[in-house]
Amino acid sequence: MAHPVTVTAAHPLDGLGLRAVGPPALTAVAARHLALLGADDLGSTASDGPGIVSLRGTDGRPLTAEIVWADLAPEEEVSDEATAQAATGVAHVHGRRDGEPRGLAADYLTTACSVLAVQGLLAALVGRARGCAVETVRTGVDLAGLLAVGQYLAAATAGDEEAVPFSPGGPPFTTADDVCFEVETLDPAAWVAFWRSLGVAERLAGSAWRSFQFRYATACCPLPGELHARARAADWEGVRRAAKESGASVCALRSLSDRLTEPRPAAPWRLSPLLPVAGPPSRGAAAETARPLAGLTVLEAGRRIQAPLTACLLGLLGADVVRVEPPGGDPLRGMPPMCGDLSARWLALNRGKRAVEIDIKSAAGRAGLRDLVADADVFVHNWAPGTAERLGLDDGDLSAVNPGLVYAYTSGWAGRLADVPLGTDFMVQARTGVGEAVRPAGEPAAPSLMTLLDVLGGLLGAEAVLAGLLLRERDGRGVRVDSSLLGAAEVLTGPALRRAAEGGGSRAPEGFRRPLRTADGWVSVADGPAGQAGAASPDMLAGLPETTAMTSAEVLASLRRRGLRATTVTTALDALPADPRFASALTRDEHGALAVPAPWRFA
């Protein structure tokens, strides 16, 4: 069904003034997103200290977000992107494919934290409209880091065996004509058929499936060397032919310069107010300062990570989340490692949600879903393209049942690019240049095996839903909101693309964010802007003694005597609950699964 007509400008922050003060690394993305939502940018001031982003309306009531590097950890431990990635385990998870910790060359956690700050401001405004008096929201880059590794952390501390052992390795593959590519399929038969077409024995290809399938969960993917060798013996045309014949999907890695030639919208989401006018939304239970979405109902039909994380964040903000699962329940409930009878990873995304089993392929099931939609405030899904339209469950269909609904679709490609592969995290990374942006110069481009875009896409999905709820409060209409993994990739690669467009180098310099090996672990040094107090320059690091002969404590002491900021690198996630930097904030749920803290504090 065609989308209902957009009848007003989708700017829920019209009439609000915006000011940002503090380090641009902490405030720039948040300020940009708030301006895209309609706030009048009154200017930004760069300074040391926390980032302060303030909104003020004609009533004069300010609403302020404070963004800090370290909300939980000591400030001397987490003071920039590099040390935040190191302390929270992000560098460890990203580095699993390489067998040692590696910092992401893109500013992943500050980007995620900025989105969390915008979410907090939007949730506070929705809460104000519903009767609670929120004045401030606070979030931290270290909180964003714990959220980003939440699933990996829950699995590592479950006390149960992993589905596959950790070991370095994984895609991408390279052809005889030097095309670097990713392959994707959700079907083991298609996987085996693809490799059989390239000359790999069926039994060998089949033995590699489990490692490939679980790479989303483990962030590593050791594969038999013959798979890489057979890919290297074929040309790109032969690989594409094998993919077409088998039903697998392949994607050649694109560079950031390739992306410069393709149009990109300013915003990573789209808000479309819907006809007809619904009238003022039902208030339900009163909002609470710490839970500004209390009394609202979110209906989620999500798979894997992106949509479930969107709904999880809305639940942390106080919404009642009802999860729609197929008959028999979500198969991922049984994905090892387990906490009792539930997957630790599944709990990281879905704890606290109610569940209902519905067969949306049946007429009775679809009718039951519409009944639930009639009483919901938000419906969010990430079904495959065309599924909602085919089943009569698109925005037009459901807004007829509930004119005040915020209908959210969290997709892979947002329907914006032609001839795209499956819209999964690693394929979107490959297609959009993320594989280049997250690796410094001197290293071959390769998508991270950490689910970067699924997590950032889920964050952007929640941001879009909150903007939709605020727009509904302002004009009484239901809203369709669209977000995507593609949008997440564009936000993450934005700084590199801007540097490339200005004629500078798009990639970080060689060795960027490579931790220092010590006798008993690893240490990461702050890499803030040149000249920033405590940030390391190559000359400063070159003057260090051989760190492999020193303990991490000795290296830290040496660095700090030189005025440099640094922290030890978390290389074992199961040690984080006892780590004094974070131990006080990590808890266990009723199933025994480790839970990371909500990433906002409202007052």
Image: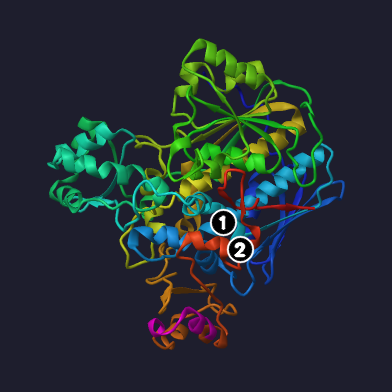
**Which numbered circle lies on residue 124?**
none
Front position in the image: 191 or 585: 585
* Residue corresponding to mark 1: 146
Front position in the image: 92 or 585: 585
Q: Is residue 32 above or below residue 37?
A: below
Q: In the rendering, at what x and y percent does residue 303 appear?
A: 48, 34
Residue 104: in sight, yes or no?
Answer: no
The quarter of the picture where residue 356 lies is top right
Residue found at the very far top of the displayed protein: 363
Amino acid type of disc 1?
Leu
Q: In the rendering, at what x and y percent does residue 220 appear?
A: 35, 53
Q: Is residue 162 above or below residue 167?
A: above
Instruction: Identify which residue is drawn at 54% across, 87% down.
Output: 562
Instruction: Identify which residue is drawn at 22% across, 32% down.
Output: 246
Q: In the rendering, at what x and y percent does residue 203 appear?
A: 17, 40
Magenta stretch in the rendered image:
547-557
**Mark 2 closeness class: few <14, some 14–19, many ≥20 residues within 10 Å:** many
Q: Secondary structure at mark 2?
A: loop
Amino acid type of disc 2?
Phe
* Residue corresponding to mark 2: 582
Instruction: Identify which residue is drawn at 37% across, 35% down.
Output: 418
Instruction: Identify which residue is drawn at 54% across, 77% down.
Output: 535
Badge 2 vs badge 1, beta-carbon distance below 8 Å = yes
Residue 43: in sight, yes or no?
Answer: yes
Front position in the image: 85 or 453: 85
Question: In the figure, is residue 529 to the left or right of 161?
Answer: right
In terms of sequence position, does the residue under pointer 2 or pointer 1 come before the other?
A: 1
Q: Main secondary structure of the magenta part?
A: helix
Mark 2 or 1: in front is 2
